[in-house]
Amino acid sequence: MKKIKNRAYFAMLIAFGLVFGLCVFAVRLYADGKDWTMLRANQSVYNDGVLDTGTVTDRNGVVLAHAENGVFSYADDETVRKSCFHAVGDFSGNVGTGAISVFSSKLAGYDFFNGVASVSGNGGKVKLSIDSSLNAVAYQALAGRRGAVLVSNYKTGEILCMVSTPAYDPNNPPDISNPAYEGVYMNRCLGATYTPGSVFKLVTLAAAIENIPDLYTRSFTCQGGVTIGSDFVKCTGTHGQQTIEQALANSCNSAFSEISQELGADTIYNYADKYGFLKSLSVSGIDTAAGSIDKGEAGTSNLSWMGIGQYNDLISPIAMLRFVSAIANDGVAKEPVILKNAHSSSNRLMATDTAQKIQELMSYNVAYAYGQGTFPNLKICAKTGTAELGDGTSNAWFVGFLDDAENPLAFTVIIERGGGGLANAGPVANAVLQAAVGNS
Ligand SMILES: [Zn+2]
């Protein structure tokens, strides 16, 4: 009897094993099936390793890339082709984060039950959230300089403008060994990290709002800089006595040195981490570059510079866009997406009170320091950054959002070695935002 019982258990064990294996296979087929189908060796989908079916459009239906029976085409307009080079990618697969590569299974018309539905048919359609006309405006405003421009709707998470330069016309590929095209395949919006300079003061400010009880009644003194240990932390001006509002608008290094020393490296680091600057994000399945920050030691100028956005701070443009979007949206980040009407999950980055206080200060920046006249008819709230790179050049940053229910737009502009943030990145932001709200 005991023997029979054992055999029965054994048979059941085998049965369980079979069922389990089947489940694993089903799950893997569901999860990886499209990858198996889309392996580049699968010649029914790819023609010599290149996707030969499908259409990519912008949010308004403008065709940005189309493939049919081995005939490939891109947008009709040359500036659109160049400005959408990284968002769309190319049929050679050089831009790994472009839509043609990332959404290849959708373009091939893959679905779970039928595999590839329409071999050498019209394939699938991918509608990006990008407005190609905004991309063209941003590309022209960059005027040959290297950098990244991002604009999103902070209520939906949709990215409306995503331009990375250098780029080129996919209809007319240049000799990319020319130094002008160094790193041309990288989408700097998602894949690059930069020294943030003073735009990082927004992170330090958020930490100060939540950790320094008398922040709003305190007076910050600037005598052109401040001595920390044996080093001098130089300021860009001599700002005298300031409130926190004035210190942010002046982008005063003396004030932010004082705040950084008081908060300490761990607190600043933890806020940067909490706000997503130190991890890779996913934009509609595209992994972005993680930023990094080294902690400056207590009582050293390194700690001051860490809180000012210098030292070894590095952040990605997309993480900055997500951060200013959360500030604009009362603390909740709608996760950036690149597909039109795609679901965007929500994550609270900071308390509503904190976000609203930063909104006020970023509005004050424009009124007090940047000049509303530079941004006609825009309800703009912003922060500049002029991030020194140690060789006499600096990255020009301009980040922020519109406090405008009809145009809930967040933006990030960076120009590599572009000089002062306000003077150089500011006009690029203005040009794109004016076009986005329909002023031009
Ligand atoms: Zn100062």
Image: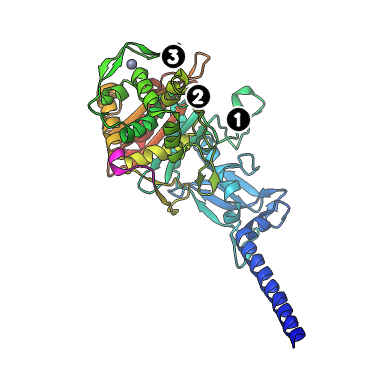
Residue 350 located within the stretch drawn in magenta:
yes
Q: Nearer the viewer, mark 1 or mark 3?
A: 3
28 or 90, nearer to the observer: 28
x, y percent for residue 355: 31, 39
Where residue 229 is drawn, which disc sits there? 3
Where residue 183 is drawn, which disc sits there? 1
Name the residue tied to disc 2: 416
The residue tagged with tag 3: helix, strand or loop? loop
Q: In which quarter of the view is residue 107 placed?
A: bottom right
Tag 1 and tag 3, C-beta contact below 8 Å: no
Residue at the farthest bottom position: 1
305 over 6 or under it: above or below? above
The alpha-carbon separation of the residues under discs 1 and 3 comes to: 40 Å
x, y percent for residue 400: 36, 33
172 over 341 or under it: above or below? above
Where does the N terminus fall, quadrant-wise?
bottom right
Region rendered in magenta: 348-354
x, y percent for residue 334: 40, 47
x, y percent for residue 214: 25, 29
